[in-house]
Amino acid sequence: MVASPPSSADAAAAVVRAVAYRRRLARADPAHLHLTDAAIEERIVGLTAHARPLRDGWWLTGRVLDGVADAEFLVWLEPASGRVRAARRRPLPEATPPRPRPDGRYYDGTRRRWVEPDFDIGRADEPVVQPHESDSPGPA
């Protein structure tokens, strides 16, 4: 059975606590001494979300976007004890480019058609002219 979700005020308070913690870490880091308090506050922000149940009584209540550390953190709240966790979100894997087709064709989304690289070398609005064997100059 899922426990009742935290109130929106509790969820917002959890995100505020997580943001305050991340800002405190950024201020304590000697690499960021050149940043003012306003710059740190501008780069580390929190977003509340609709609470989603996770496991063992924990609820996902929002996220912290940390521009100083270039990371995103998920904010978890356990309403029974009031504990808050901020876990770094795993980065998405890089998209691998599609493998080329064996015949060399590719889909051009702008023109909305398949393109044959051997014959289609003009602009989209120009007609494609293909040379014929009878038109080519031969040995004289």
Image: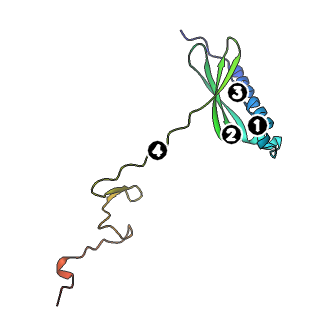
Residue that label 3 marks: 15
Q: CA distance from mark 1 to mark 4?
A: 31 Å
Is the residue under label 1 in contact with that under label 2 (CB below 8 Å)?
yes
Q: Residues within 10 Å of mark 1 (few under 14, many from 20)?
A: many
Which numbered mark, 1 or 3, is in the foreground of this view? 1
Element marked by disc 2? loop
Element marked by disc 3? helix
Above/below status of 6 relative to 91: above
Is the residue under label 3 in contact with that under label 2 (CB below 8 Å)?
no
Amino acid carrying mark 1 in the image: Ala
Is the residue under label 4 in contact with that under label 3 (CB below 8 Å)?
no
Of the image marks 2 and 1, the number of the one nearer the N terminus: 1
Of the image marks 1 and 4, the number of the one nearer the N terminus: 1
As rendered, which of 114 and 25 lies closer to the eye?
A: 25
Q: Quadrant of residue 30?
A: top right
Residue that label 4 marks: 95
As rendered, which of 12 and 68 lies closer to the eye?
A: 68
> Which residue is situated farthest in the bottom direction here?
140
Q: CA distance from mark 3 to mark 4?
A: 31 Å
